[in-house]
Image: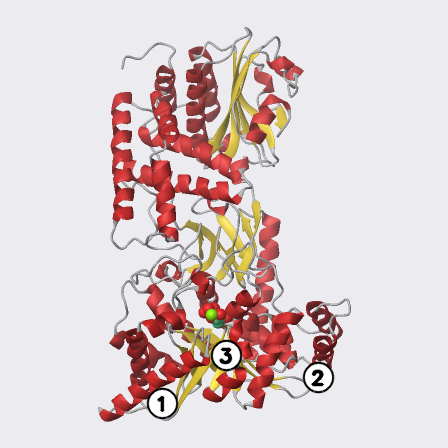
Amino acid sequence: MPLKSGSPQILLKQLRETLAEPLESQQRLDKIVDVIAKNMSADVCSFYVLRDDRKLELFATFGLKREAVHMTTLQLGEGLVGLIGERAKPINLDNASEHPSFAYRPETGEEKLNAFLGVPVLRAGQMLGVLVVQNKEKRIYSEDETEAMLTTATILAEMLSTSEFENLIRPGVDIDLRRPRTIEGIGFSEGIALGKVVLHDPRVVVTSFVADNIEYELERLNKALCSMRMSIDDLLNRSDMQISSTHREILESYRMFAHDRGWERRIKEAIKGGLTAEAGVERVQNDTRARMLRQSDPYIRDRLHDLDDLANRLLRTLTDNNISEKPHILPDRAIIVARNMGPAELLDYDRNKLVAIVLEEGAITSHVAIVARSLGIVAVGQTDSVVSLCENGDDIIVDGSDGVVHLRPNADVETAYIDKLELTTKRLKRYASLRKRSAITKDGHKITLLHNSGLVADMQALAETGANGIGLFRTELQFMIASKLPRINEQVELYSRAMDMAKGKEITFRLLDIGGDKVVPYMRSAAEENPAMGWRSLRLALDRPGLIRTQIRALLLASKGRELKILVPMVSETIEFKQVRKVVDKECARLKKLGQKIPEKIELGAMIEVPSLLFELDQLLPEVDFISIGSNDLVQFLTASDRANPRVANNYDPIALPRLRAFKLIVDSAKKYNINVTMCGELAGRPIEALALLSIGMTRLSMGPSSIGPIKELILSLELDPIKKQILDLLSNGANNITVRELLANNIEQQNLPI
Ligand code: PEP
Ligand code: MG
């Protein structure tokens, strides 16, 4: 295609030459606005950069007074330039002075200019500046011209993201791209970590922007689109793809976008404007991200996220995976930032370097959060747009206790956190000094504190916290992180190592609890509308008896004669529990016959997670050796609110009277039958919630290892009887304008408890 003088392609060619010239930064910018103005026959071309004080500063101009450069500033929203900065959308007018937002700046000498075209300068959807051309004559700029401006803006954005203009910035201000940000989220795992950002899905780095040959670039795009569409179709047609799984839904929506003509057309227009195929995709993706960041409707945001993912796939194909490599070797104090991830991906990272994770999505009872907690990795989730706000290597502070992330923190915030960290270290030392003490309240109530565990890596914490044992060993974690079904000998190895590491302390192995949100990728299951209430856990195990038979056999073999405690998850009816008892008895008999050692004592317990069991405790309890309350599931079913759905998961207080009454009913019944009851849901590790549980007579709490110290410290300073009395009164006489939580908070204050 021959290049027309004054065409966008010529403009890009000239820009490329300018970029290659050995010029000072200001000279280069001056030349760029000069080239744009001449190419577009504009009387004025100006480039504004958004500063960290949210003002747009004139960085270069052709046509306005030179003295105004670095002097003139506009607030976001002020004048037409500020309006573009605020909305991240181009404005094209034939008579700018008639627009209600027009702001006249005498110092720029901006006289009698009618036509105005301004475009946002965006990177990863973030507003970085505004590029403007103006003409005296009244005219509307053509689509080609708008396209050329947007293309130029993409290049300017890349320049801004490097340190190219560092020396042009006055002391005391910075460009907005490097502005410190505070992002509120939800604390998934306690603690504070200071470190450097490592993006879980590194961005594709586009290094070549200006096309040499447009036809060739269009062809490259077509090929890449074709291969991407084929790979999505292949995935959808795979025989193991479920008919309506979430994964399938995502792929369906990818397919829809991958065939979207509008998207393809916009990329092609960008290429025809003179960009390489990858730069064209990047430009369109920038617009998408900008829209995404300004959308509040979660459905539309999800769809835009899909489109964003798709653009990344396309970029990877086009650049031959030219991604800023996923660091095999993490930097020290690495903080992984991701949209979301599974527990297996988290475990792939080097534990010696990784100090925290930040997720845009997730939920506090999701499994990645559970694994983070059990490994003592600080975690914050539900941090809106964090991935597009940060770059690899940015400084970041993660506060898992307050659920806040500070990106590129300023010196004051950093100092405050270093102080806070020192306090935390002191607190941890204090907790360590309590390690050997028993958890007994001041008025003599002895409490058993146990860990929730599931990995060899988190068993090590037992020696550090001095807990009484493992109250819940989630055996499914081994299944979730493996790439194929763990064989019996692998299971035996894990269980016997865990028993060795428990060093004679009690350890309760929970039978496989998969399904629901605990996805085991290599096990196919039919699509379900409501996986949390679907074919999961014990239901799945009873339908596939081979699975629990093998697991029970592995547990018996691993015990090598030692005492064994097995916990059955998601029991809905006593009869199901009895079926498991039969399998255990059969396996024991088989081992005996084979002359193998069987455990000196086997205890079989049931988890109370399904509300209907509350109405058959008198039938269940005589059958079991112990019980455990899984409050994560029990509360989700009692309140009919999905624990994995952030929109409803926190809507109901788990220690409000109806839930507390349910817990008390279980505790009282267990007492009647003289069996142990342990609380092993996440509630047990939270101080106020733990206090509520203690006040209804619960004496065994199982929690993430990092909660043992704070809960033990609380117990040691506590007079429990007066609180018990008040809570029991509230439970039987109803609330008198006070919630359980408020009542406990008052007591915490009165007794000056360490919370
Ligand atoms: C629970 O439901 O409270 C529980 C401990 O089990 P999980 O969180 O593994 O479902
Ligand atoms: Mg559960």
Where's the N terminus, which quadrant? top left
In the rendered structure, which disc, 2 or 3, sits on the residue that comes first in sequence?
A: 3
Where's the C terminus, which quadrant? bottom right
In the rendered structure, which disc, 2 or 1, sits on the residue that comes first in sequence?
A: 1
Neighbours of disc 1 within 10 Å: few (<14), some (14-19), many (20+):
some
Q: Is residue 466 visible?
A: no
Q: Mark 3: which amino acid?
A: Ser
Q: Which residue corresponds to mark 2?
A: 721
Q: Which residue corresponds to mark 1?
A: 562
Q: Mark 2: which amino acid?
A: Asp
Q: Give the numbered dot on residue 411.
A: none
Task: Determine the secondary structure under disc 1.
Answer: loop
Percent across and percent down for residue 282 are 39, 33
Q: Which residue corresponds to mark 3?
A: 628
Q: Residue at (61%, 13%) from the top-left corner? A: 110
Q: CA distance from mark 2 to mark 3?
A: 24 Å
Q: Is residue 654 left or right of residue 734?
A: left
Neighbours of disc 3 within 10 Å: few (<14), some (14-19), many (20+):
many
